[in-house]
Image: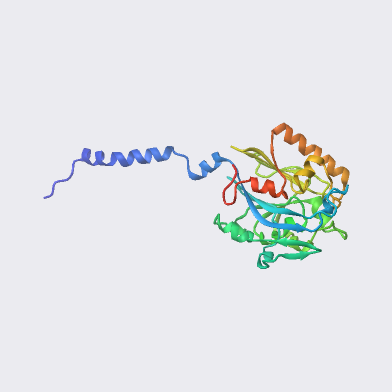
Amino acid sequence: MSKMPAVPRILSSLRPFAYFLALASLLPSAHAANDAAGPRLYAIDCGRIVFKDMAMFSDTGDYDGKPGTLADPCFLIQHAQGTLLWDTGLGDKIAASRGGVDFNGIRLYVDTSLQDQLKTLNLKPDDINYVAFSHFHLDHTGNANLFTHSTWIINKIELDAALSPAPSFGTDKSLISAYEHVKTQTIEGDYDVFGDGSVRILKAPGHTPGHQVLVLTLKHAGTVLLTGDLYHTRENRRLRRVGTMNTERADTLASMDRVEHIVSNTHARVIVQHSSEDFRSLPKFPRYLD
């Protein structure tokens, strides 16, 4: 008859395993660690826009006859409570035309589709929880209709203006047609996306009636402000220039005043979204700012 091992010997052999389990129970889960890390900001290249004449970006003639190129990024924010895509850039279909496409004499380029870039993070459009827009011009809504499983955070004033009989220059209603079928969160003023103050949409009308900016509070980088089209260039911010396409000059200047006070009070890093310099200053995707 075989001899049974002594109970103390069995317990002794299990002690290292029990110690490991006890230690593991004290460690934060991956989700909890993500909570502690705070939001991450990814800057995604969603196209560029080439102008023979930048005259529309100043109503005082500063750019008349001058060529220029604007960046057209999208921004992905990963938060413990979900993902937010801020602006959707130019349409992915443009990526099929290596020579770009023409829009009223303006050349639009997309080198790599937004969908392909999201794959780098193992994401599909269906994985994005929220989509929000600085405004509804076509260079910010080009891929909007891809996100039919997302909740669209829509400024009511901006939507009403886009659907009006005479929408502002650059608005293409067909690019936001999915709004009729997707889940929506309608807002009219400032909005705290995740309820913890780390990702806030702020009203900043003037470029369009419902134009907005996005303010992020990041753990290491501090406050970061994405300006939408409040400014199109660094110079326009510095010199308070107003574009000819803006729907209301006075509202634009008032929004600039508000944003610059916020920047002063929070020491925010300002990202002029269409500035190629500001876009290049951010970590190159898929690296991120946190």
Q: At which x and y percent is residue 94?
A: 69, 65
Indicate whether 286 appears above or below 28.
below
Q: At which x and y percent is residue 243?
A: 84, 49
Residue 203 in view, yes or no: no
What quarter of the picture does the C terminus occupy? top right
Q: At which x and y percent is residue 270?
A: 70, 41
Residue furthest front in the image? 66
Residue 74 in view, yes or no: yes
Q: Quadrant of residue 5?
A: top left
Tell me which residue sits at (71%, 65%) in the image. Answer: 100
In the foreground, 285 or 212: 285
In the image, taking residue 233 as reference, residue 37 lies left or right, namely: left
Residue furthest top in the image? 265
The total number of labels drawn is 0
Residue furthest left in the image? 1
Indicate whether 16 appears above or below 82.
above
Q: Quadrant of residue 217?
A: top right
